[in-house]
Image (cartoon, grey):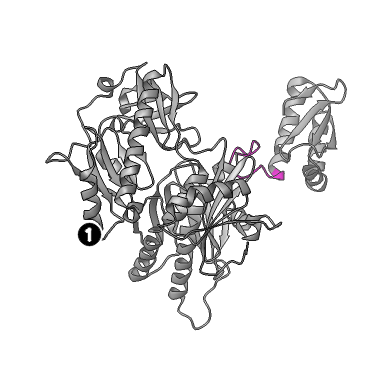
């Protein structure tokens, strides 16, 4: 297999290991998207469960559903028919069997009239559990295939908005109307359906109907919360994603998975000439294509821009913030300063759009661009941001730019971020990203020593502490500490211990050996 990377090539790398699978999308040799899946974080979105209502929260018109070992969350709008949400999810416009579209929200509905505790329900995951938040559920089931999506309890049909040619849309609508579907069942044509024959669409529709009957049958036989249907794994999703994006190559470093993909791709080759290749080199694939380096960059707070500026990523409980700084890119002599700042901001937009996808940052995001005096220039940067975010598969909403250069935006949160998958909060700083400095520790040591001597009446003390703090005290504050001990008619001995954390100190009695809480 040739591993030469053409500068114009678009490809997907699938790295398969014992406990982890990673999928990387590269365009022109540069990483633009990354999915990391482990057993703990394996995607449950799309899974269908037989659940049991555990608790109803009337104040927010929601309920917790036991789906087998964990609780999911459902709102009344996801219990009642909500065509609007499905239209947004699949990017379509529904056409309805009746003359008028059904109501998507019912303001007068009460969740206690729809659900009762202990009731068995058929639900589907629409949003992954993230952090302490359980999975978001819906009772409006959808079964996606390659070309079609079956709606078992919504008698509507639609065609993806991404199919723009009018004759193709009309052909697909005509095919949908020709299907003899059970009452109350609807169908959606996905973007890939424009390349499918009528026979292929008919075959898939029949397959989805059979799958739905199997799910119903299993639901009726089950007696408690359980999984009824599992959405496709990362391997199949990666393969279909490669066809959707029409990439040039899918490169796989596991031979068994390579053979599996070669077999699965047989019926899709007419859509797009995807090359599936097995990676044989001794150098790990992600290292060879610089993906490991990009992952390390995506886990750091500071990201340098080509012109010398940099981005600084930070996170609070409520939002993510991205600060754009000029860094080393000071305006050159004779060059318009305003234009230099605009160029830094435009470079920042390109990297922000890329980093949001790689890091999989979701929720509320505040971008703080470098101030620009001209309203025209602020519009240039904002338009460029909106244009770059169009390529993002996650839905984004971008508001205007303030005079201070602030842009508020939201990005759809579908799964854990890269940092949430790979990191956990530091048990020492509890996620604050900092520890007490040596001066603070020195002051606290003196305060604690006084408390022990006065309250415990122990006048001989040993203090174990990290060598870094020990050296600081010896060089800066040891005389102050010894003087304080002398005033208390006590003695203190400092003992360095490299096994201790920088902020960890241990007081013991030099007479009895008793250890005191610091």
Which secondary structure type mostly characterizes the magenta part of the structure? loop
* Outermost residue toward the right in this view: 511
Q: Nearer the viewer, residue 361 or 436?
A: 361
Q: Is residue 508 depicted above or below 332 in this figure? A: above
Residue beneath the point at 22% across and 33% down: 184
Q: Nearer the viewer, residue 256 or 493?
A: 256
Residue 40 falls left or right of residue 362: right
Label tally: 1
Q: Residues within 10 Å of mark 1 (few under 14, many from 20)?
A: few
Quick check: can you spot residue 514?
Answer: yes
Q: Is residue 335 depicted above or below 202 in this figure? A: below
Q: Is residue 159 depicted above or below 389 in this figure? A: above
Residue ID for mark 1: 167
Residue beneath the point at 43% across and 65% down: 371
Horizontal and vertical percent for residue 373? 38, 69
Residue 188 within the magenta-colored segment of the rendering: no
Quick check: can you spot residue 142?
Answer: no
Secondary structure, mark 1, is: helix
Q: Which residues are magenta?
A: 425-439
Horizontal and vertical percent for residue 134? 45, 31
Residue 161 falls left or right of residue 272: left
Residue 436 within the magenta-colored segment of the rendering: yes
Quarter holding the N terminus is bottom right
Q: Nearer the viewer, residue 344 or 286?
A: 286
Horizontal and vertical percent for residue 135? 43, 33
Horizontal and vertical percent for residue 518? 72, 29
* Outermost residue toward the front in this view: 199
* Outermost residue toward the bottom in this view: 334
In which quarter of the view is residue 208 placed? top left
């Amino acid at each position: 297999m040739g591993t030469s990377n053409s500068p114009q090539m678009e490809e997907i790398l699938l790295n398969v290991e014992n406990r982890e699978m990673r999928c990387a999308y590269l365009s022109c040799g540069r990483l633009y998207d990354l999915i990391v899946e482990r057993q703990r974080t394996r995607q449950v979105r799309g899974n269908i469960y037989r659940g049991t209502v555990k608790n109803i929260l009337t104040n927010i018109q929601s309920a917790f559903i036991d789906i087998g070992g964990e609780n999911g969350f459902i709102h009344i709008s996801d219990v009642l028919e909500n065509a609007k949400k499905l239209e947004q999810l699949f990017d379509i416009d529904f056409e309805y069997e009746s003359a008028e579209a059904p109501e998507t929200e019912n303001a007068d509905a009460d969740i206690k009239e729809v659900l009762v505790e202990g009731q068995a329900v058929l639900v589907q995951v629409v949003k992954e559990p993230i952090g302490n938040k359980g999975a978001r559920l819906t009772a409006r089931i959808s079964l996606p295939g390659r070309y079609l999506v079956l709606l078992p309890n919504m008698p509507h049909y639609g065609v993806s908005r991404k199919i723009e040619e009018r004759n193709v849309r009309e052909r697909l609508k005509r095919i949908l109307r020709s299907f003899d579907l059970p009452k109350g069942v609807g169908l959606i044509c996905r973007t890939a359906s424009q390349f499918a024959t009528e026979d292929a669409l008919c075959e898939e529709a029949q397959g989805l109907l059979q799958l739905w009957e199997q799910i119903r049958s299993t639901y009726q036989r089950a007696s408690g919360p359980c999984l009824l249907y599992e959405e496709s794994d990362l391997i199949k999703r990666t393969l279909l994603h490669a066809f959707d994006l029409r990439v040039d190559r899918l490169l796989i470093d596991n031979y068994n998975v390579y053979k599996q993909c070669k077999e699965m791709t047989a019926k899709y080759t007419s859509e797009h000439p995807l090359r599936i290749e097995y990676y044989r080199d001794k150098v790990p694939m992600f290292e060879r294509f610089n993906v490991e380096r990009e992952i390390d960059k995506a886990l750091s707070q500071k990201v340098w821009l080509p012109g010398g500026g940099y981005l600084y990523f930070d996170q609070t409980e409520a939002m993510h913030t991205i600060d754009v700084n000029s860094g080393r890119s000071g305006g050159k002599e004779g060059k318009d300063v305003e234009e230099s700042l605009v160029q830094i901001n435009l470079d920042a937009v390109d990297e922000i759009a890329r980093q949001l996808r790689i890091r999989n940052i979701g929720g509320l995001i505040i971008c703080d661009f470098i101030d620009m005096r001209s309203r025209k220039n602020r519009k240039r940067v904002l338009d460029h941001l909106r244009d770059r975010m169009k390529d993002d598969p996650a839905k984004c909403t971008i508001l205007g730019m303030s005079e201070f250069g602030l842009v508020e935006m939201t990005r759809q949160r579908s799964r854990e971020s890269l940092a949430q998958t790979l990191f956990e909060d530091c048990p020492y700083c509890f996620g604050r990203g900092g520890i007490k400095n040596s001066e603070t520790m020195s002051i606290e040591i003196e305060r604690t020593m006084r408390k022990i001597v006065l309250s415990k009446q122990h006048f001989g003390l040993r203090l174990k502490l990290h060598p870094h703090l020990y050296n600081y005290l010896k060089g800066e504050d040891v005389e102050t500490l010894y003087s304080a001990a002398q005033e208390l008619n006590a003695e203190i001995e400092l003992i360095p211990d490299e096994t201790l954390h920088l902020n960890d100190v241990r007081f013991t009695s030099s007479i009895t050996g008793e250890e005191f809480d610091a």
